[in-house]
Image (tube, rainbow, N blue to C red):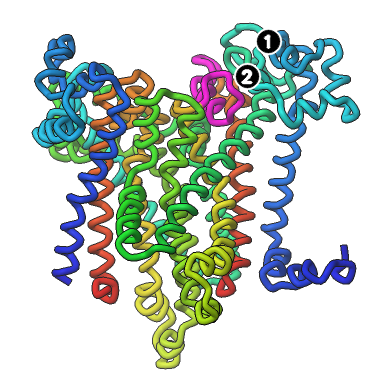
């Protein structure tokens, strides 16, 4: 087990270097002046690009440039964003907690709902609930998050005036701006508790309702499909019949014996989901006007704000690699057979 | 056609378990019919939108490139005996993909006789956009699958054929490609190489080939270990001949089917990117672009009811979801049919 984890950990830097090489390689299509913008630390520096070109070896060969660039990136200099009028790292620091909070709140209900419905469908095969889950799964699979988001926005927010867009009610945003409420983590649900103000947390949760529904309906469909089919496989296996023959209660057989083994493919799907969660939240952020990474970096793309896009790409690449690593290790823990391969 | 009227080969296919499982799946039939409807709409887009082409002034570049006058547009574009009809159906000029706009009013207008599905903001005709958008959808889907499949087959084939160190290196490259987030990759491509439908399609193809390469390599390795390959080797066939004549044709079938079912997913992804503004420019007949354009009208007017402009966003979103649904129903049925276990 330990050797498996260590071997897997050693792969991480290789993947990260490959991703950074790919990004840097594509940046070569830009002119040195455009690339220089990704090194500037402030508005003033961004005015003197020729100095930057000389300082960071932008007129030298590829590998000299790459090592200089990597050193800057590792020191946290990701350049200056025209879109947010501040260094890229500062903006990422502000917006990452927002996206992370959104991602966590989207992921947990999705996982719970998907596992619950998938189990129900498999246990009650060909009954009404199974038919419902099958239709739900295939429709959910064909429904992009942004379409679901638009429909919810029109019906829930537009027609029923429920739940609200953005992150908080306006009056709380004003309090944050005035300083009567302090920002500790940048995650509003937690900041509300830390400030001792439950009404703030409640407001933040209310604003998360639509994003959660939009994402859950779309993403849980996949978990349902996978769990249903793997659970049906397991329910037909001999050891489940043995468990039933022993006279164990149906509930124990289903949950403890069958689902424990059927859940392994779900880990794979859930792992992929975690990896792409940050990306998936970009759509949600834009539709519901949540000031996270996507709401900044997508318009930045359209404004040709290179430093912002490359900074976000590096961040997302890093988070995807780490998520993959964690899932692989988790996989080894859940199913020890895997770590021996 | 009844089974006894078929040639022997077709009868074998018709009676095969795989096809039987497919035929007996009602969802597969629904998916096939839906998809057929989309194909017909896409194919006969010029005939369906002949009225719009004839009555909306800004459709003129399309008619000019087809070489017909406004007054004769309807009679020509709906007459299959006229060669221009087939030119418009098979190789329509690029200008026909621009949605014609009836004036310059920023406010959407509800469905009317002239505009059966209404006009969206800036007076773009919605029916025209939807109908020609289905052509864009097929085009994007098939092109992205085609390019990524071609790269995947070559790379996966080399990996499976040569094996050893080459295989190892290629698989590590695919590892990196698979762990590279797609949306962010498209964003980088758009910011560096420019924002357009072509760039986005190439970026999607470039991010997707790794999955096909891995899948194909796996199938090659599986086929290589079968008895008939050993038999061919025992008969003295050279490795290249065995690969080309025996392994390759037997390994590629499943990949082709699985990949062709990805068209729907790719169209949904591309529409999502267009929605973010990455891809087709404003006014191009593309569903994602139309949905993105509708964003400002979802909540209706400031004082009015929220569903004031329902037609602006409902039609394109429903088209997109139905298109995805058609492919997914079909794909699901195909996968079930191929996998005897389920």
Q: Nearer the viewer, residue A246 or A49?
A: A49
Q: Looking at the picture, does residue A14 appear above or below residue B19?
A: above
Q: Earlier in the sequence, mark 2 or mark 1?
A: 1
Whole-angstrom CA distance, mark 2 to mark 1, is 9 Å
Magenta stretch, residue numbers: B280-304
Are circles 2 and 1 on residues that touch, CB within 8 Å? yes
Number of other residues with Cα within 10 Å of mark 2, as a class: few under 14, some 14 to 19, many 20 or more: many
For residue B30: magenta?
Answer: no
Q: Are marks 2 and 1 on the same chain?
A: yes
The residue shown at (37%, 79%) is A257
Q: Position of residue B200 (x, y in %)?
A: 46, 32
Q: Quadrant of residue B23?
A: bottom right
**Chain letter belonging to callout 2:** B
Q: In the picture provided, is B105 more to the left or to the right than A140?
A: right
Q: Nearer the viewer, residue B299 or B181?
A: B181
> To which residue does mark 1 refer?
B58
């Amino acid at each position: 087990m330990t050797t498996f984890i260590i071997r897997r950990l050693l792969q991480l830097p290789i993947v990260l270097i490959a991703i950074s090489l790919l990004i840097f390689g594509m940046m070569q299509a830009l002119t040195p002046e455009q690339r220089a913008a990704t090194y500037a630390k402030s508005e003033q520096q961004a005015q003197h690009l020729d100095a930057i070109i000389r300082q960071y070896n932008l007129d030298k060969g590829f590998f000299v440039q790459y090592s200089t660039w990597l050193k800057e990136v590792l020191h946290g200099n990701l350049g200056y964003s025209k879109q947010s009028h501040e260094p890229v790292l500062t903006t990422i620091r502000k917006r990452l907690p927002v996206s992370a909070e959104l991602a966590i709140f989207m992921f947990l209900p999705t996982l719970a709902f998907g596992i619950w419905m998938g189990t129900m469908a498999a246990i009650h095969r060909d009954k009404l609930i199974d038919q419902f889950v099958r239709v739900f799964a295939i429709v959910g699979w064909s429904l992009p998050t942004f379409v679901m988001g638009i429909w919810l926005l029109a019906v829930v927010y537009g027609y029923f005036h429920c739940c609200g867009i953005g992150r908080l009610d306006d009056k709380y945003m004003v309090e944050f701006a005035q300083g009567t409420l302090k920002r500790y983590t940048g995650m509003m649900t937690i900041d509300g508790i830390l400030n001792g103000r439950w009404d703030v947390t409640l407001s933040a949760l209310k604003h998360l309702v639509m994003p959660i529904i939009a994402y859950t309906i779309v993403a849980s469909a996949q978990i349902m499909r996978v769990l249903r089919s793997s659970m049906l496989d397991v329910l037909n296996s001999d050891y489940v019949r043995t468990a039933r023959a022993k006279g164990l209660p149906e509930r124990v057989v289903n949950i403890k014996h069958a689902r424990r083994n059927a859940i392994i493919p779900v880990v794979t799907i859930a792992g992929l989901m975690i990896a792409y969660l940050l990306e998936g939240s970009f759509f949600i952020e834009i539709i519901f006007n949540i000031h996270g990474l996507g709401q900044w970096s997508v318009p930045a793309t359209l404004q040709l704000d290179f430093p912002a896009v490359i900074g976000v790409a590096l961040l997302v690449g890093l988070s995807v690699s780490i998520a993959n690593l964690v899932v692989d290790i988790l996989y080894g823990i859940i199913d020890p057979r895997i770590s021996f391969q | 056609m009844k089974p006894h009227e078929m040639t022997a080969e077709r009868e074998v296919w018709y009676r095969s378990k795989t096809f039987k499982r497919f035929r007996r799946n009602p969802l597969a039939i629904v998916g096939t019919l839906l998809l057929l409807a989309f194909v017909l709409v896409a194919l006969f887009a010029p005939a369906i939108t002949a009225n719009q082409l004839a009555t909306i002034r800004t459709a003129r570049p399309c008619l000019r490139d087809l070489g017909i006058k406004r007054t004769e547009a309807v009679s020509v574009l709906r007459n299959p005996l006229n060669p221009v009809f087939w030119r418009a159906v098979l190789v329509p000029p690029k200008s026909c993909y621009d949605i014609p706009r009836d004036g310059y009013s920023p406010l959407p207008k509800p469905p009317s006789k002239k505009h059966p599905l209404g006009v969206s903001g800036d007076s773009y005709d919605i029916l025209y956009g939807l109908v020609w958008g289905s052509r864009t959808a097929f085009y994007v889907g098939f092109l992205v699958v085609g390019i990524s499949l071609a790269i995947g087959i070559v790379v996966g084939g080399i990996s499976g054929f040569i094996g050893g160190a080459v295989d190892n290196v290629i698989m590590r490259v695919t590892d990196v490609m698979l762990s590279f987030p797609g949306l962010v990759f498209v964003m980088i491509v758009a910011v560096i190489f420019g924002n357009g439908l072509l760039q986005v399609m190439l970026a999607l193809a470039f991010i997707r080939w790794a999955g096909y390469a891995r899948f194909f390599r796996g199938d090659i390795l599986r086929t290589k270990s079968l008895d008939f390959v050993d038999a061919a080797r025992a008969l003295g066939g050279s490795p290249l001949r065995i690969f080309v004549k025996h392994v390759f044709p037997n390994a590629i079938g499943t990949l082709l089917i699985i990949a062709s079912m990805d068209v729907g997913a790719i169209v949904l992804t591309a529409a999502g990117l267009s929605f973010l503004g990455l891809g087709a420019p404003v006014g191009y007949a593309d569903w994602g672009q139309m949905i993105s354009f509708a964003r400002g009208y979802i909540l209706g007017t400031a004082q009015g009811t929220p569903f004031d402009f329902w037609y602006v966003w409902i039609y394109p979103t429903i088209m997109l979801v139905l298109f995805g649904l058609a492919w997914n129903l079909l794909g699901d049925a195909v996968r079930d049919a191929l996998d005897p276990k389920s």
